[in-house]
Image (spheres, rainbow, N blue to C red):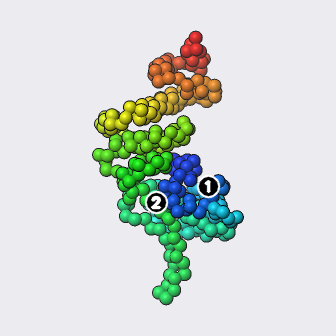
């Protein structure tokens, strides 16, 4: 099962400014990019339902050229929820009461359905008087066309294209384009792994789709092909490592950090050999002996 909230929080917290530049460039014109501080997440309890809610991203930002600040509150919503607009207003009211700062509220809707435009306001009004008209900015990924983002030199575009409006026949092409864009950005290895992991989580391909994906890669230039294949290979290795560690921990319990590091540094052929050998291991010493033999 995909941990949607974790994936989106990791993406937005690591590429917060890039996220704003992609969707809210007007905001970046009046904030100081060197004065962004992520605040502790706030936990709220709905006294009616008894449910607890936690804010996703809350950042204190300085106005450019001023000594004043405002908050940017970003919520991610992976499923459609009735009365979500009311919850957003409650967040706003409680955050404003605590910090007494202007708040710029944003919601990213990443669900597949419904396709209709999400509600972006919460109102209280009478026939003769409007008491409240609270609005928040929305990004509804299933209403955005991935083709509009393929030329955006932005890591958030590379990731979020995987959750946009995609025809089923285009899934292999979209995955290839996400990775093409990613390798052109030349990010450090950790950031590349974060983005590529996000893409792979949301665009798992079938065997038939993988063939189409490989055909799409063949259209790229040689340098881009090689860089993309490095990422694809890393997915395979990471999957092998994860599976082997799970099996070993089930057989022998918790492994030492040293052993885990040794396994994580094995090549793909070595991981295949270990996958076969571990079936015959009876005790942890069999594993350490096998690893020691590799160093000889």
Determine which of the numbered discs, if any, sits on residue 33 in the image. 1
Q: What secondary structure is marked by label 1?
A: strand
Please give the label number shown on residue 125: none
Crowding at dot 1, Cα within 10 Å, few <14 / some 14-19 / many 20+, comes out as: few
User: Left or right: where does residue 241 sit relative to residue 52?
Assistant: left
Extreme-front residue of the structure: 65
Query: Residue 101 lies in what quarter of the image?
Result: bottom right
Q: Residue furthest top?
A: 296
Taking the view exactly as shown, the residue that stands out farthest to the bottom is: 128
Quarter holding the C terminus is: top right
Confirm whether residue 49 shows in the render. no
Element marked by disc 2: strand
Q: Position of residue 174 (x, y in %)?
A: 36, 45
Name the residue located 40 percent from the left edge and 65 percent from the top edge: 117
Q: Is residue 278 above or below residue 168?
A: above
When the figure is inspected, residue 45 is found, relative to residue 126, above or below; the finding is above
Q: Position of residue 200 (x, y in %)?
A: 44, 41
- Quadrant for residue 258, please give it: top right
Q: Is residue 285 visible?
A: yes
Q: Which residue is mark 2?
A: 139
State which tag comes first along the sequence, 2 or 1: 1
Q: Is residue 11 above or below residue 247?
A: below
| Residue lying at 42% horizontally and 56% vertically, measured from the top left | 141
Determine whether label 2 and label 1 are within 8 Å by CB.
no
Q: Residues within 10 Å of mark 2 (few under 14, many from 20)?
A: some
Say whether residue 49 is left or right of residue 70.
left
Identify the residue at image location x=58%, y=23%: 262
Q: CA gap, disc 2 to disc 1?
A: 22 Å
In depth, the one of 197 and 192 nearer the eye is: 192
- For marks 2 and 1, give the one nearer the viewer: 1
| Residue found at x 49% / y 71% | 121
């Amino acid at each position: 099962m995909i941990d949607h909230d974790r994936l989106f929080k990791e993406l937005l917290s690591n590429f917060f400014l890039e996220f704003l530049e992609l969707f809210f460039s007007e905001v970046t014109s009046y904030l100081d990019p060197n004065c962004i501080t992520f605040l502790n997440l706030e936990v709220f309890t709905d006294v009616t339902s008894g449910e607890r809610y936690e804010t996703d991203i809350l950042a204190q930002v300085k106005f450019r050229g001023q000594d004043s600040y405002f908050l940017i509150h970003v919520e991610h919503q992976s499923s459609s929820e009735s009365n979500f607009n009311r919850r957003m207003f409650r967040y706003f009211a409680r955050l404003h009461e605590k910090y007494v700062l202007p708040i710029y509220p944003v919601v990213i809707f990443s669900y597949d359905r419904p396709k209709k435009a999400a509600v972006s306001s919460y109102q209280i009004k009478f026939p003769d008087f409007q008491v409240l008209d609270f609005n928040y900015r929305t990004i509804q990924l299933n209403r955005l066309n991935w083709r509009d983002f393929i030329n955006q030199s932005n890591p958030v575009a590379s990731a979020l294209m995987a959750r946009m409006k995609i025809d089923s026949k285009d899934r292999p092409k979209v995955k290839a384009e996400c990775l093409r864009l990613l390798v052109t950005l030349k990010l450090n290895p950790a950031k590349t792994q974060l983005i590529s992991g996000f893409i792979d989580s949301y665009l798992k391909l079938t065997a038939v789709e993988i063939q189409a994906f490989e055909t799409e890669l063949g259209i790229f230039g040689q340098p881009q092909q090689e860089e993309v294949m490095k990422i694809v290979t890393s997915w395979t290795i990471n999957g092998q490592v994860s599976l082997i560690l799970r099996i070993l921990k089930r057989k022998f319990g918790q492994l030492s950090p040293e052993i885990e590091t040794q396994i994580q540094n094995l090549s793909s052929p070595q991981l295949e050999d270990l996958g076969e050998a571990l079936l015959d291991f009876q005790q942890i010493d069999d594993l350490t002996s096998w690893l020691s033999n590799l160093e000889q």
